[in-house]
Amino acid sequence: MDETAVLIATMHHRRKALEQALTRVGWRLVTFHDVAAALEHLRTRPYGAVFCDEYLRGASAGGFLVWSRRIAPEVPFYVIAMTGDRASLGASHQPDGVITFPPAEAKLPSPAKASLWDAPPPESRELPLEGRTSTVRLADLIEMVALGSGSSLIALGGGLVGRVYLREGLLEHAVSRVEDGERSGVRALAQLLDLDDVDFQILPYRAPSQRTVHVPSAAALVEAARLVDERRRDVALLDAVVAACADLSGVAVGYSLGQQASEVRGDGVAAFALGVELLAALRPLAGQVSHLALEREGQAVAVARLGDDRVLAGIAPRGRSMVLLSALVKAVKQHRR
């Protein structure tokens, strides 16, 4: 059994504590604070185990685990986490163990204990170049390519659902065709990350027709994850309005400066445009209005602000303006909790 282990930790105080504890139980450590350098070592040299801190700058333990399983599926992989909970890692693959930080030496795997590890056959743990995102998450695929500064095209649904272009670790372009038309850039990436189950292929790199992102993949994934979270909150927001005012004609939420709704129900596009127009018209007279309702031309209109830059607007049959406004205000209050 090789007593040499690779330790990946980018936070200085955690790295020192892990080095001391692992050395005391018998490991000879090769320590890395640079993720790319650690990957290069895993490709070229033998080792007995991998210890990876969950707090990595510019990468995630889940993404590193995917790469390790592909390079050396027979080697034990341990994650150091605050909770010791496998489910909290959110990775497509599971590590062989989760070590709670700060580490307790009695619970650390030693070289002798690691040699007793009963691994499944390597072929059953090999990450294929195609599969489904229910098995391997898109975020992990992107990190797998980016960690090695690789260049690839990730095609979802044969490229018809979406495509993600990575060149030398940078995310150059993403395009999605989900629901209402085609999107590109980080918003497209957010849509693709939010898909539950779709087939994927990792193909040789080809240059995209345009470049809409061109940032490190880690930065793109963080922003896309924020947009996914925002969209889920917006969906819950509109669902709450519809439940409270079932006869509305349309409702939408979005950024007022962008003049475009980000989430829509029914005739929400018209509702959003009208709501933004009303708020802009009232600003010289009444300043920043938080919410309003009115009756006009056979329909009721209601608008509510979500902070300074976001607007929730709806339209309903005439005579329902106060009911609609109440639904909007209640949904906004729930959203802020």
Image (cartoon, grey):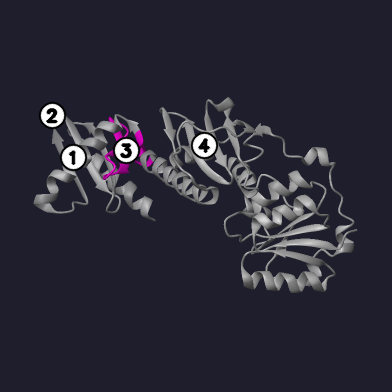
Q: Is mark 2 on a helix, strand or loop?
A: loop
**Pointer 4 or 2: first along the chain:** 4
Instruction: Give the residue at mark 4.
Output: 192
Circle 1 packing at 10 Å, graded few (<14), some (14-19), many (20+), is few
Query: Are the residues at dot 2 and dot 3 in contact (C-beta closer than 8 Å)?
Result: no
- The residue positioned 72% from the left and 65% from the top of the image is 31
Eye-nearest disc, 2 or 3:
3
Instruction: Give the residue at mark 3.
Output: 261
Instruction: Give the residue at mark 2.
Output: 297
Circle 4 packing at 10 Å, graded few (<14), some (14-19), many (20+), is many
Q: What stretch is highlighted in magenta?
A: 240-264
**Pointer 2 or 3: first along the chain:** 3
Q: Is residue 94 above or below residue 314?
A: below
Instruction: Give the residue at mark 1.
Output: 277
Q: Is mark 3 on a helix, strand or loop?
A: strand
Residue 4, image quadrant: bottom right
Task: Give the Cα distance between marks 2 and 3.
Answer: 23 Å
